[in-house]
Every structure is written in structure tokens, then in C-alpha cells.
Image: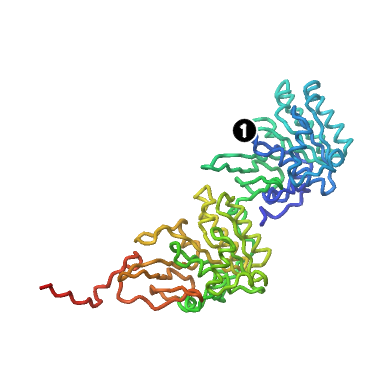
């Protein structure tokens, strides 16, 4: 992933949570006090414990104080299902202490004494107060509550102990602790159709830049995964843009011939058309020209790797051999309930890891279906195209249109022409009681191309572009008819 901004010299405590430190520009400021808030079920306790267990991996020591009536044995039992949990570290590097009774009997002064004693005795470098909302309920006045926050900040700052206050969100933006702490991390769960989406937002982070806005997160057996909003992270490409002057073959010589000799390197192309038109065939031939020195990535949604390999073999492309040699990697994701930003990061991470030069995204609709906010789609793909370009990747998208025939073509991305340099359109046409396929080169930026509509065929060696259609009109509607200048057969004589 990229960076929110160049790291600063302020000492940091990394969260160790995938993606979160990117949002935080390197982590939390060491010794700061941070509120982590969200509705019940948003995962506050999981997030805090994940940060704690990652912290002790680096030699830190953690004091985890609960202000809830829930027993620690139940908490540890739940944490035991997560991969980051380390039972051997409990009571040594990480200590769980109940502050519930102390708060009930001795109030905020008693809790402060408990924290001071435990932080010093345990040499804690990280503190968690789980159930922080209870401290405000125990305060006799707002002034006493503010004093508690002030004294707590002084204690942990002197000890160099980074502190997290876990609390529910009561919707009050003016609560006193919000103005006093060093940072606020807000977690939100919201319904989106049949799905529930989770977002994290850094509302405040003193002494640090951070990646603003909402960022999706997911929770699995490994804990939290934060997926920074893609177009925010890559608002500026990660390096200088070098314009490609060379060309890559599409893998189909007859197609290369009509587009000026191939696709310009680092360009982005889209092949659109209805199901069955041959979009994936073009894509497979393109990715089939990859080599171990200039590797390719096939990033697909709808057809599984075994099916793609069978389809490729039918046109003479051996994906098994290409993957075995390191020339091609296949990444497949079921288009069910993926996280939109996670897809973008997975793609770019794979490109960086293997220094990919050819990329086929087969089934762009799988990306689009993951976007719960349609307004983001164009911005997302603009950022993706810019980043792939500066990474030296030549990209080919395949995108399905809905209708087999008709004058209107519905493309699922607005302004598709502005997002790609090259646009190829495939469709079926009925002419003289025969079904044919035609290819239109809509645009090829900075390149000569043949604008004629051409029929094409597909056989066991792939796609073959034929001669231009002559003497026909309305081909792009799917219902061709002879042009007015074309000689028409004489009418049959009337029957006797």
C-alpha cells in the first residue's frame, strides 16, 4: 500500500493491524491517549486486544483494565478463537485487571490510584480502559470528570504509556473527553441492502497527519483488517509517470494489425461486449504473451481458475505451463460479498509483489458489484489506472454489456472513455439470416487504428479479425440491412 503522507519524526506506536497504520500515517503517537468508540458489536474489544498482542511481540508490556462486570475468563475464551491471541503471554507481558469494584467503591480517585500502581509495577507501555463510559457515570460533576482525564493524561505521559479508552458512541459530539484526548477512532456498522458494512474513521489525531474519511474494515479469524479508501490513498500516484512508447502484442496478430501494431505499454484498455462475444478470449491471448521476465496477472471474478485453464487450452494457451514458469499468476475472487477497497489493494499488492507488466482484469462487473456507493466507482478506477500506469503495467479490462442486440449500449461505468486510453467494442449482428460477430475500435489514444467495422471469428487458435463489412448499414444496432447504394436482387415475378 501507499502512504497517507511522508512519515513524521514524532515517536510512534504501531498498531500492527493490517491497513490501520497506513490510515494513521505510521501509528499512534507514543504516550498519547486515544478514544476508540463505536456501537456494541463494532469490534472495539477485538481491535484493542489485537493492538495489544502485536505490541508485546515487539517487547512491550500491556495493562488491560476492564470497567465492566464481564469476567476475564469469558473475554479470554472469546479471544482464544483469534490467531493473534497468545495464552502464554497472559499474566506476564499482558495483564488483565478488573477496575469495576474499585470504581464502584472508591470512585475516580481510587481508579487513578489503581492505574498508577499497576502501570508502575508492571512497567506497562500500553494501557487499555475497556468500558470507559462507566467513568463518566461515576463522576460527581463534569469538572471532576475533566480532572480525571487530565490526571490520567499526566500519568500515562510520564510513563510513556500509550492509552486506549474503549467506549460506546452515545452520539454526543461535545463530550468533554473528546476535546481533551489526543485522538479519536470511530467505528460504524450500517446496513447496505442485505449486507452489513463496517467503516472506521479517524476523527482526530493530534500531532499527526492521517488519511481522512471513512475506511472499510473486516473481521475474521485473524482479527481486524482495515482497507484504506483506495482513491484517497492513491490520490497522487506513488511515483513519476513514464509514458510508454513501446507496444505489447495482444497475442492475436490480426488484432494487432488493426490497432497500429499492439497496445502501447502502460496503457489501459477495455474490451466491452455481451456475454459470449469473446472478451475473455482476447484477454487470455493477451495474458498468454507474458514471460517470466515480464510477468502477467490474471485477476478474475466470474470464471474459476480451472475453467479459465480449460478455456485457454481450447485456443492454444497453456495457463498451467505459464503459471508453473512464473510467467502468469491467477488471482480469483468470488463476486459475492467482497470489500471494494480490499479488491483494489489486493490487486495493487500483487502487481508490486511480482512486478507485473501485463494485467488482465476479467469481469470488471465483479469490481463494480462490490461498490456500495456508485459515486465512488469512477474515482476509484481513475486512481487505479493512474497507479498501474506508474508501476509500468499494461492493463486490459473485460466488461460485459447487458443486451445482445439494440441501438443502446449500457456500460456499467460512467465516463468509461475517460478512464481508458483504448476502447474495443464487440457485439453480435444479424445479417441476411446469419449471426455474425463484429469488432469496432472505438478509440486508440496516441495511435493509428483502423476504424472499419470488421467481422471476426474464434477457433482453436484464438480470435481472427476479418475484412471490413461492405455494403451494410446499422451494424452497431445488431440488425444490419443493405445500404441504399448496394445492388438489390430483382423481385420475383408474380405467380400465374
Residue lying farthest right? 121
> Which percent across, then down, holds residue 311?
54, 68
Q: Is residue 458 left or right of 156 when viewed as pictured? A: left
Q: At 75% across and 27% down in the image, what residue appears?
A: 69
**177 or 254: nearer the eye?**
254
**Which x, y percent locates residue 83?**
75, 47
Residue underneath mark 1 = 173
Q: Vertically, is 369 above or below 390?
A: above
The front one of 378 and 90 is: 90
- Quarter of the image with the N terminus in it: bottom right
Name which residue lies at 84% across and 45% down.
60
Name the outermost residue toward the left: 496
Indicate the position of residue 372 as horizontal and vertical percent values: 53, 47
User: How did the renderer colour the structure?
Assistant: rainbow
In which quarter of the view is residue 432 placed? bottom left
The residue drawn where x is 78% and y is 35% is 153
**Mark 1 neighbour class, 10 Å CA radius: few under 14, some 14 to 19, many 20 or more:** few
Answer left or right for 434 relative to 271.
left
Residue 365, horizontal then vertical, whole percent: 50, 56
Whether residue 135 sits left or right of residue 429 in the image: it is: right
Q: Secondary structure at mark 1?
A: loop
Quadrant in which the C terminus is drawn: bottom left
Amino acid at each position: 500500500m501507499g502512504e497517507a503522507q511522508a512519515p513524521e519524526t514524532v515517536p510512534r506506536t504501531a498498531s500492527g493491524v493490517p491497513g490501520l497504520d497506513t490510515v494513521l500515517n505510521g501509528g499512534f503517537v507514543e504516550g498519547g491517549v486515544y478514544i476508540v468508540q463505536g456501537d456494541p458489536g463494532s469490534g472495539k474489544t477485538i481491535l484493542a486486544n489485537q493492538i495489544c498482542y502485536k505490541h508485546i511481540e515487539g517487547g512491550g508490556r500491556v495493562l488491560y483494565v476492564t470497567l465492566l462486570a464481564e469476567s476475564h475468563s469469558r473475554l479470554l475464551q472469546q479471544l482464544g478463537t483469534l490467531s493473534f491471541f497468545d495464552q502464554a503471554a497472559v499474566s506476564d507481558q499482558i495483564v488483565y485487571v478488573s477496575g469495576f469494584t474499585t470504581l464502584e467503591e472508591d470512585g475516580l480517585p481510587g481508579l487513578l490510584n489503581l492505574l498508577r500502581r499497576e502501570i508502575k509495577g508492571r512497567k506497562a507501555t500500553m494501557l487499555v480502559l475497556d468500558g470507559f463510559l462507566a467513568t463518566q457515570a461515576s463522576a460527581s460533576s463534569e469538572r471532576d470528570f475533566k480532572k480525571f482525564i487530565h490526571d490520567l493524561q499526566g500519568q500515562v505521559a510520564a510513563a510513556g504509556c500509550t492509552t486506549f479508552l474503549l467506549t460506546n458512541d452515545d452520539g454526543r459530539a461535545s463530550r468533554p473527553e473528546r476535546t481533551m484526548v489526543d485522538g479519536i477512532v470511530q467505528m460504524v456498522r450500517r446496513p447496505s441492502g442485505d449486507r452489513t458494512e463496517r467503516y472506521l474513521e479517524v476523527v482526530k489525531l493530534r500531532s499527526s497527519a492521517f488519511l481522512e474519511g471513512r475506511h472499510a474494515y473486516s473481521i475474521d479469524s485473524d482479527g481486524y483488517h482495515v482497507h484504506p479508501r483506495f482513491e484517497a490513498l492513491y490520490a497522487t500516484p506513488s511515483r513519476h509517470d513514464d509514458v510508454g512508447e513501446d507496444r505489447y502484442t495482444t497475442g492475436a496478430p490480426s488484432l494487432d494489425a488493426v490497432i497500429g501494431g499492439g497496445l502501447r505499454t502502460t496503457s489501459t484498455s477495455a474490451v466491452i461486449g455481451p456475454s459470449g462475444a469473446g472478451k475473455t478470449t482476447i484477454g487470455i491471448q493477451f495474458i498468454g504473451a507474458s514471460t517470466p521476465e515480464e510477468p502477467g496477472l490474471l485477476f478474475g471474478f466470474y470464471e474459476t481458475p480451472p475453467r479459465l485453464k480449460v478455456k485457454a487450452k481450447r485456443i492454444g494457451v497453456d495457463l498451467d505451463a505459464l503459471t508453473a514458469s512464473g510467467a502468469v499468476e491467477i488471482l480469483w475472487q468470488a463476486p459475492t460479498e467482497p470489500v471494494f477497497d480490499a479488491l483494489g489493494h489486493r490487486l495493487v499488492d500483487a502487481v508490486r509483489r511480482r512486478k507485473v507488466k501485463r494485467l488482465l482484469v476479467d469481469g470488471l462487473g465483479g469490481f463494480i458489484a462490490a461498490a456500495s456507493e456508485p459515486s465512488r466507482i469512477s474515482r476509484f478506477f481513475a486512481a487505479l489506472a493512474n497507479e498501474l500506469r506508474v508501476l509500468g503495467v499494461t492493463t486490459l479490462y473485460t466488461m460485459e454489456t447487458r443486451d445482445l442486440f439494440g441501438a443502446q449500449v449500457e456500460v456499467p461505468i460512467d465516463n468509461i472513455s475517460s478512464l481508458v486510453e483504448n476502447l474495443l467494442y464487440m457485439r453480435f449482428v444479424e445479417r441476411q439470416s446469419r449471426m455474425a460477430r463484429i469488432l469496432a475500435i472505438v478509440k486508440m489514444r496516441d495511435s493509428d487504428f483502423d476504424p472499419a467495422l470488421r467481422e471476426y471469428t474464434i477457433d482453436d487458435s484464438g480470435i481472427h479479425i476479418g475484412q471490413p463489412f461492405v455494403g451494410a448499414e446499422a451494424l452497431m444496432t445488431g440488425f444490419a440491412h443493405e445500404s441504399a447504394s448496394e445492388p438489390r436482387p430483382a423481385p420475383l415475378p408474380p405467380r400465374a
